[in-house]
Image: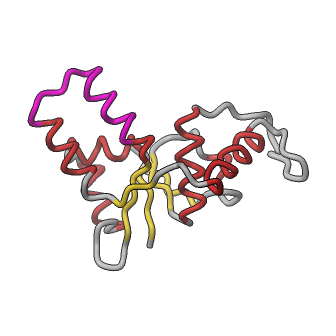
């Protein structure tokens, strides 16, 4: 199974929270036969969180080590860029031939990149955000983790 981690889930891994232990138990994302990916956009978000919250050396080191355990997913392919554009248009209910079926959904630009990467990888997106809910079954295989 291929998993793409949203930034909020990685934070639980840094904290080594109960939620992290539940994910490990239920999905075993780093186990044999599974692949765990992290989008470069999430790496930027996580480093920004570390700076803004003035994390100490130990916690930053743990974050960097953890990020090294993932396959890195970049955003530079034309396929990913096109997917970003399509998901953004779909979320704004302005994609010809593919209706959202509800009022438009404003997504953060980072979340759009993460969604595009998950779609291109064919990955299950592990998140605790509701920002991706409208993409479930259309662009994403979403695994919503309740905090």
Residue drawn where x is 15% and y is 36% of the image: 59
Q: In the figure, 56 relative to 66: above or below?
A: above
Quadrant, the N terminus = bottom left
Q: In the figure, 87 relative to 109: above or below?
A: below
Residue 92: % across, % down? 77, 35
Figure quadrant of residue 35: bottom left
Prevailing secondary structure class for the magenta stretch in the rendered image: helix
As for residue 36 lying within the magenta part, the answer is no
Residue drawn where x is 64% and y is 53% of the image: 78
Residue 10: % across, % down? 32, 46
Query: Given the current orientation, which residue lies at the most extreme left position?
Result: 58
Residue 144 horizontal side relative to residue 136, left or right: left
Residue 118 horizontal side relative to residue 17, left or right: right
> How many labels, in total?
0
Give the residues in magenta: 43-58
Query: Given the current orientation, which residue lies at the most extreme right position?
Result: 97
Residue drawn where x is 28% and y is 73% of the image: 31
Residue 103 horizontal side relative to residue 21, left or right: right
Residue 31 horizontal side relative to residue 134, left or right: left
Quadrant, the C terminus = top left
Model colouring: secondary structure
As for residue 50 lying within the magenta part, the answer is yes
As rendered, which of 51 and 81 lies closer to the eye? 81
Residue 21: % across, % down? 24, 56
Residue drawn where x is 67% and y is 60% of the image: 137
């Amino acid at each position: 199974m291929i998993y793409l981690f949203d930034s909020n889930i990685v934070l639980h891994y840094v904290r080594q929270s109960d939620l992290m232990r539940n994910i490990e138990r239920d999905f075993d994302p780093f186990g044999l036969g599974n692949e765990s990916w992290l989008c470069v956009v999430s790496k930027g978000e996580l480093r920004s969180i570390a700076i803004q919250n003035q994390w100490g050396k130990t916690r930053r080191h743990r974050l960097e080590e953890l990020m090294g355990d993932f396959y890195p997913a970049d955003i530079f392919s034309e396929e990913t860029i096109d997917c970003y554009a399509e998901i953004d248009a779909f979320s704004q209910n302005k994609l010809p031939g593919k209706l959202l079926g509800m009022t438009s959904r404003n997504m953060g630009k980072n979340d759009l990149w993460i969604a595009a990467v998950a779609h291109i990888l064919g990955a299950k997106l592990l998140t605790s955000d509701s920002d991706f809910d409208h993409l479930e079954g259309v662009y994403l295989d979403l695994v919503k983790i309740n905090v």
